Image (cartoon, rainbow, N blue to C red):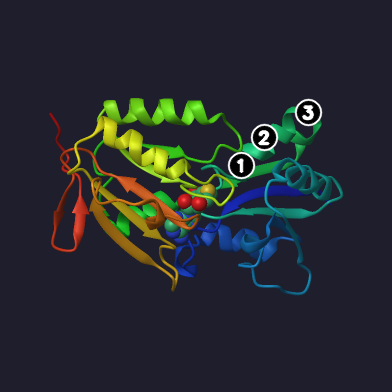
Amino acid sequence: MTGWVKVAGLGPGDDAMVTDQVRAALATATDVVGYIPYVARVAPRPGLTLHPSDNRVELDRANHALDLAAAGGKVVIVSSGDPGVFAMASALFEALESRPDALAHDIEILPGITAMLAASARLGAPLGHDFCAINLSDNLKPWDLIEKRLRLAAQGGFAMAFYNPRAASRPGRFERVLEILREELPPSVLISFARAVTTPDERLLTVTLAEATPDMADMRTMVIVGNQDTRRIGRFVYSPRRAG
Ligand code: SAH
């Protein structure tokens, strides 16, 4: 029996946003590995072993998946949203760098709806023109680099989508993010806080940069900063297709 590894995105939360491709992979898997809350979204069934693991052990988890596949397992590594966006797909390839023989397994990445796009759809179309995505966590990169990218993106006129905006382990950081944005952008720029989108805990809030406060974001929030043309229409926020 030959094993396989599929890295699957479960989407932002709503089961209706899990793709048929991901459902089919989960239906034939023998093992599911992933961060505890993501594995909890997979229904148990006979013949399927769930292997939840803690945060920040991504390389161990990827190696565990490859070990299971080497023993003939059909393994799905689950991520929230899309597995290629600040998630497990890169961790799997990092693990493969030190054990290239494992490339012989059937390896596939199954996309999902990333939080940024789910949030954007709930808000309207704030990412309808050029934009960039920035992970505000400094777990895997120096804080200075985050500040630099933030400043340059603001100067470049990009709309911005922030993942991991705030954590108890980095108090004051999101305040600093708002400070940098205020140095680079007019106070009228719109900033949206889209929390737990597509789940029962969803909350959407759009304010101006002048009105934004750090407590508007938490770890379940996508922050979307508009460009200078981003505007409201009814209950929606959108960025026009043209600029300049
Ligand atoms: N791979 C995931 C992102 C993982 S990083 C994806 O593609 O969506 C985790 C961050 O994603 C969270 O801190 C939060 O900023 C964002 N996020 C994930 N699910 C979300 C949701 N349902 N609503 C709002 N933000 C979400």
Mark 3–mark 1 CB contact (< 8 Å): no
Q: Which class describes the residues within 10 Å of circle 3: few (<14), some (14-19), or many (20+)? A: few
Residue reaching furthest to the right: 71
Residue behind mark 2: 93
Image location (x, y in percent) of residue 104 = 76, 35
For the residue pair 193 and 158, the one nearer the viewer reads as 193
Label total for image = 3
User: Residue 98 got which mark?
Assistant: 3
The amino acid on which the numbered mark 3 sits, given as a three-letter code, is Ser
- Mark 3 beta carbon near ligand 1 (under 8 Å): no
User: Residue 89 got which mark?
Assistant: 1
Is 2 displayed left or right of 135 in the figure?
right
The answer to which of marks 3 and 2 sits earlier in the sequence is 2
Residue 121 found in image quarter? bottom left
Q: Measuring 65% from the left and 49% from the top, which residue is drawn there?
A: 6
The amino acid on which the numbered mark 2 sits, given as a three-letter code, is Phe
